[in-house]
Amino acid sequence: MLSACVPEPESAFNRQLHFCPIPYKPVLKDHRLCPPPAHTCVQPDSVHEPSRTRWRFIVFQARFGFALLVAISLGATVISPDAFAQTISIGGKVGAPLNDSFQQSSFLDSFTSFTKRYTVGPSFEMMFPVHIGFEADALYKRSGYTQGFSFLNAETKVNSWEFPLMLKAALPNESLGAFVNGGLALRHVQASTAIDTTLTSPITTPLALPEPWAHGAVVGGGVSFKLGSIHLAPELRYTRWTSSNFDALLFTSNPNQIEYLLGVSFKR
């Protein structure tokens, strides 16, 4: 007597998730070919969706393509500026902050902040015939603060780089022109703390910041004039930081930043 084809029992886990345990293969029982099981199942999600590694690779390709496109565009404008009739300016910025980098949130005398009154960094500008263009800077600043107690003194030095990316509109003139700019700004901060106690020698350690990056909005304006082959552009600039690098009990980063800058550039 020939035995009937009995389907293999399905586990509760596979029945709940509707997974196929293994691809079905015909089974020969007593010279009879058993048909496939009657229930339907689907393959796991990993068959239908790309893995995380593949997704990261796709994101990397997109970012790399965007960066390559920007690099090619900038290279084309630098190599053949006459084709687009734009003016490219490469130079630098020097200046000074007009307010402190920190604001005290407590009336205790144990905290004192200091801000070095200088700002310096390279600058890039590209202006089109309609007197509208783009400006990007990389500005370095230095600041810090001290905290003193009866047996311990700590001094923290802060190095920051700011990267404003702005649109610029100019009113050119042979003798004296004017301009306004505005856009977004990024700030990256690194800090180290020197601890001096009555029991040990001074120790300098890097300060781990919860937020090394901050972002905000920037606006500014000024005048421009030419001195020989050099173009000078003094300006006032205001940055409103919408995120903070420092957020302690006694102090926080100042969200309002005002500074004076002098742009020195060579145009082609």
Image (tube, rainbow, N blue to C red):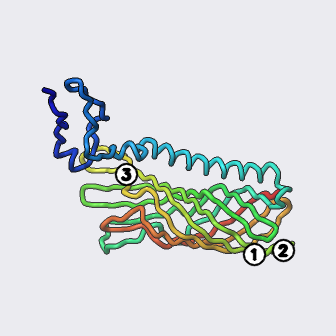
Label 1 secondary element: strand
The type of residue carrying mark 1 is Ala
The percent position of residue 161, horizontal first and vertical second, equals: 54, 56
Q: Nearer the viewer, mark 3 or mark 1?
A: 1
The percent position of residue 65, horizontal first and vertical second, equals: 61, 48
Total marks shown come to: 3
Callout 2 touching callout 1 (CB < 8 Å) = yes
**In this image, 20 relative to 81: left or right?**
left
Q: Which residue is mark 2?
A: 173
Q: Which residue is mark 1?
A: 178
Q: Relative to 266, is 232 above or below?
A: below
Q: Which residue is mark 3?
A: 207
The type of residue carrying mark 3 is Leu
Q: Could you say which disc has been placed on residue 169 in the image? A: none
Pick whichever, 162 or 175, lies toward us: 162
Spatial CA distance of label 2 from label 1 is: 8 Å
Q: Residues within 10 Å of mark 1 (few under 14, many from 20)?
A: some
Label 3 secondary element: loop
Question: Mark 1 or mark 2, which is nearer the start of the sequence?
Answer: 2
Pick whichever, 74 or 230, lies toward us: 74
The percent position of residue 49, horizontal first and vertical second, equals: 41, 47
Question: Mark 2 or mark 3, which is nearer the start of the sequence?
Answer: 2
Question: Mark 1 or mark 3, which is nearer the start of the sequence?
Answer: 1
